[in-house]
Image (cartoon, rainbow, N blue to C red):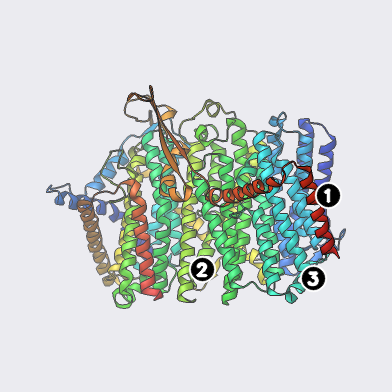
Amino acid sequence: MNFLIFSLIQTVLVIALAPLMIGMIRMAKARFQNRRGASVFQPYWALLTLCRKEMTITTQSSWVFRVVPFVVLTTSTVLAILMPTLGFGGFFAQASSVFLIGAILAIGSLFLVFGGMDVASAFGGMGSSREMTLAALVEPSTVLTLVTLALAAGSWNLDGIFASFAHTPWYASHPLLILTFLALGCVILSEGARYPVDNPATHLELTMVHEAMILEYSGPYLAMLEMASAIKLTVLALFLMGLVFPWGVVASGAGIGAMVIGILAMIVKLFVAAFAVAFIESTLVKMRFYRMQEYMTTAYFLGLTGLVLSLLF
Amino acid sequence: MSLDTLSMLILTGTVGTLIGGVIALFSGRKAVANTVVQALFAVSSGIGLIGSIGAFLGCVTHTIPSASFALSAAPSLMTIDAWSAAFLVLIHLGTLLASLFAIGYLPSYAKTYSFPTLNFASALFIVGMQATVMASSVFAFLFAWEMMSIAAYFLVIADREEASIKAGFIYFVMTHLGAASLLAAFLLLAKGDMMASFATLHANAGTLPMFTLALSFFLFFAGFGSKAGLVPLHQWLPYAHPQAPSHSSAMMSGVMLKVAVYGFLRIALGVFPQIPMTWAIIVTVIGLLSAFFGVLTAAVESDLKRLLAWSSVENLGLIFAMIGMGLIFRQLGLPEAPFFAVALVHALNHTIFKSGLFLSAGAIISQTHTRDLDAMGGLAKKWPAFSFGFLGLVFAASALPPFGTFYGEWVYLQQMAMNVLKVSHVSGFLLVLVISVVALVGGLAVFTFGKVFSSIFLSKPRSSHADHVKPLNGFMVWPVMIAAILSLFAGVFGGALYQLLSGVLTSSSAVPGLFATVSFPGVMISPFFLFVLFVLVGGMVMLLRRFGTSQQPVRMTDTWDCGQPLTARMEYTSTGFASPIRFFFRSILLAKNHMVTERVTPENAYVLRRRLEWSVSSIWEEWLYRPIANAILAISAWVKKLQNGVIQFYILLVLVTLLLVLVFAV
């Protein structure tokens, strides 16, 4: 199959499944709370409704406020294009350097922060300050875990890492990489604005980070930001799932049959990831923001231990 | 271009600046005189820029016959090779931007600054920097270095305020400690011959004993490090740079610090036959410490210009960490050239964006009349174009794609990470720690500049000055825009820039294509490709928004703030924004929070008012400078006992001294 078509399918698929991931997490959380919950497809309707609505913009804002949704959605989409989720060997394989991912995530965070600060409300400022702090503190862990995976796989592209792990699963070659995966999981929860770092379901100023920044957005812009957030979480979660459970990962040259199996495997992994996130959110409490350095340090040392145990000694 | 033409162009750059300085000295305080002088500076540096780019390309592609060529007017003192040419490009670029800016910036400060002295000092400063990188002998180097350093002192005290004079004093002491170290180091290597050339130094270095070499190396490191603002000799920088007029701060932070980098590179690579592992590790660790402390202090700083100065400490720290890592890799027998090349790339990028940031700081402060970020805000609505340019510089300073700084740091990280498994386990582990520190520094840089942009341009204005800013003069806007555009070009064509600057080391003989990529085994770094990807995806998102969603007109409303009237007092200030960082790094920043409770009377339980006092202090000041100062004071107090006012005792002292002199002299 053509590399370009493969990349296209992968990107479109991830973007199309992103709201489903959010829907599944909400559904699983509802079941944990003995509620029936809304349909897993509800986020699609919510986004479509937002797209059709009128927009209100605060008079306090400047041009920055209107640019933010575009930049944030662009960075998330670029992530979906560059990061392998369905399989490896796509058109952008060479460009998916491990050092690029942290930087692209940082651009998205930076613009969200600008959006939060531009509206002149105390909520936006609070969310912005917190988000920026988290983005700064998580950076070493992001780089460290990705470097570890790159060293273990012998490739400096995420794509190569994906391919290598699909060929030789980590539990066969480096079982102690489980620590690195845990660290990467912590990074993803932080980047995806999920428990125990952030509470996506609250509008209480004590606990919110991501929600506080997008508080003033409405209509299509809000839809763009929600979509960007969903894509980011889905891409990162699917990347991690693909590494941990390297079954059904498709090579770009594979036939239609393998492709269908791969897509089914991807949906199953998405379900598992959504369940895991919902499980964490239903069993853990959110950490106090001023204890976040403990979380970040734990993630960093998990990653460092993983690196040392599986590669250096 | 022929050698003579290049030589002429570069000399015109120097002589034109000097003439400008002389004109400034004899033409009063009128704004017109300033315009003429600054225009002359700008034209001279423009000509010098063309000449030095030509010289650089000539040296890299070997169309200039030998490795270096002498300037026709002063062949024994001034020569130019690829290194000098690279740094000359930097100097001329920074000067050009700053001089253009000063045309629009200085006239409104006619009462604060005396133009004749300020511009004369600027001329000497610029010429001093140019001469330092062209100097071919010890004497010429030190002379030019001192000219640059002393002229910079007059730039720092230009407004003659008390704070400036204090800052100038700190600068003067530190720069002379540095100069003294350099003089000692040079004399050690030159065996006392002040006219020795760098080639002679190199020859001498091969014959000197190890101890002398080590002593001179660390004296060099202290001398250049104090000028570059490396810890623990960085103390003067955040005091001195903010006090100078903003266009001078731009030259000091953007350019003068690079002259120190040039000096260190010249000595470390060109003079010392080899740098042992321990020395290289010390250079790297000091560089990383500077980067970390620089960015951490910048993150919690609320004085705009001081914050930028701290960020210079960070970036110079990174440059030295790159050079140090290169020296380590050379000792390990691994490829070291990429590190020196990225150090050059980062130096160039830092010159562009830091000049731009200091210039924009000047423009902002000229209207808001404060350096305090807590009193700014809301400028994006008033200056949309300017804020867009500033945003570009913010990206460059935070090392984010698609700007040039990012690619420098990327190659740096990539080069280290690729070798983690090729060295011993312990070295690999240490490399991983270095990578993590650089990542943390990068994260905090994003925090710092996110804070800077938000505090200056977003939210409501937090002071009436910020609320009533007037449109900016074009001469103040365009240099900032040019800097932003150059930063972007340095990123989009980052591969070509990297390869071009590697030419200094690897003696490549071809000029790389504009869309060149940086390739390592298994990795391709193609800045242009990524830029195109971003633009395409962004375009698609815009199309989707245009055709896929509701196009109803936007309704303008108020920000929701719980039904209260919204005031600027409710927003996060820069200080509030940085509060989490102050908390998380409290033990390093020595941050203290103290709640002061005022009661009606001391015994009464009723509280009149409470206020929070907080402070951060410098670990170096508290744990290094203060103990040394206390020790010196204690010794002085002890020595003072001799001064007891008894004349017989003084006569006895004279007699003893005389005796000792006689004993030792005979």
Q: CA distance from mark 1 to mark 2?
A: 43 Å
The reply, left or right, for residue B153 in relation to residue A28 is right
Q: Residue furthest right?
A: B73
Question: Which quadrant holds residue B472?
Answer: top right
User: Which disc number belongs to residue B416?
Assistant: 2
Badge 1 amino acid: Val
- Please report whichever mark, 1 or 3, sits nearer to the chain's N-terminal start: 1
Do marks 3 and 2 share a chain?
yes
Do marks 1 and 2 share a chain?
yes
Can you identify the residue that label 3 sits on?
A: B200
Where is residue B232 shown, x and y percent of the image? 59, 54
Can you identify the residue that label 1 sits on?
A: B15
Where is residue B154 shown, x and y percent of the image? 74, 41
Near mark 1 (Cα within 10 A), the count class, few <14, some 14-19 or many ≥20, is: some
User: Along the line of sight, which residue is nearer the eye, A238 or B284?
Assistant: B284
Above or below, comparing residue A55 to residue A312 in the picture: above
Q: Residue furthest front?
A: B648
Badge 2 amino acid: Met
The reply, left or right, for residue B299 in relation to residue B213 is left
